Amino acid sequence: MLWLNFFASNSEIALSAKILWHRLTCRLAHPTGIVDSLTHLISILMISLFPLAPRYRLDDECVWLKGIDPSRHYWIYVNGDREEVAIVPGLIVENLDRFKQTVREFRALEPGQSIEIHRAAQSFNIHCIAANCYGLETDVSGALVWHLFDRETIESLLMTAHPDWQCAPKDVELGRELLLQSWQQAFAA
């Protein structure tokens, strides 16, 4: 019965969990009633999911952002590890109207929805996992990884697409490093 206390913050979840518990412990319960109760509880949990997963935040104690290069790539220390850096493509827009439209689309995301951001050579997805929890897909060491962010952080990253944004002088070197990596890949192929 301890697991019921976990859901006490949401009365609908708590009520569904209690009904399911009652039906599971009642010997006379009809299997259909148990399945219906379980299905209802799962649907509520899917809608009101509150993930406790760690996510990157602007006020994070652990430094996770190495920088944002001039071509709007986000350089992220994976889980704060300075040895493992993921380079996530950022938003680039051709005009201010497209910038505003993309920010509106992001703000309208509901849990379970995603938007695809297209760039010239690549694209990426922003997934709304739950309220205030978003995932960006990247490839880290050959594996597909979702970096989790809160809403404020994703919005701040998207703001780098504004035409007036300029990268920090120290981050210009990151752009050069990315260019050098792409040349090395071209020569290796």
Image: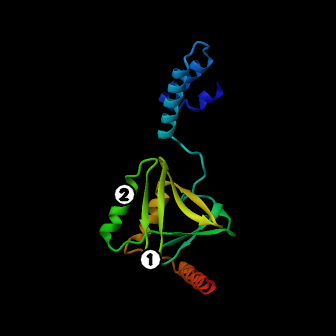
Q: Is residue 151 left or right of residue 179?
A: left
Task: Count residues near mark 2 (Cα–Cα under 10 Å), then give few for <14, some for 14-19, many for 20+.
Answer: few
Q: Relative to residue 3, is residue 162 drawn left or right?
A: left
Name above or below for residue 65 compared with residue 172. Answer: above
Q: Residue 146: name its quadrant.
A: bottom right
For image coordinates 37% across by 62% down, the residue present is 102
Image quarter (top left, top right, bottom left or bottom right) of the C terminus: bottom right
Residue where numbered disc 2 is placed: 105
- Residue 49 pos. (x, y %): 52, 41
First in residue order: circle 1 vs circle 2:
2
Q: Can you identify the residue that label 1 sits on?
A: 166
Viewer-proximal residue among 11 and 123:
123
> For the residues marked 1 and 2, what is the alpha-carbon distance in whole angstroms?
23 Å
Tell me the SS state at disc 2.
helix
Residue type pointed to by label 2: Glu
**Residue occupying image coordinates x 48% and y 65%:** 124
Q: Looking at the picture, how far across and down is residue 35, in whole percent?
A: 53, 26
Q: Is 13 left, or right, of 162 in this rendering?
A: right
Which circle, 1 or 2, is nearer the viewer? Answer: 2
Name the outermost residue toward the top.
28
Label 1 element class: loop
Closer to the camera in the image, 167 or 148: 148
* Residue 101, quarter of the rendered image: bottom left
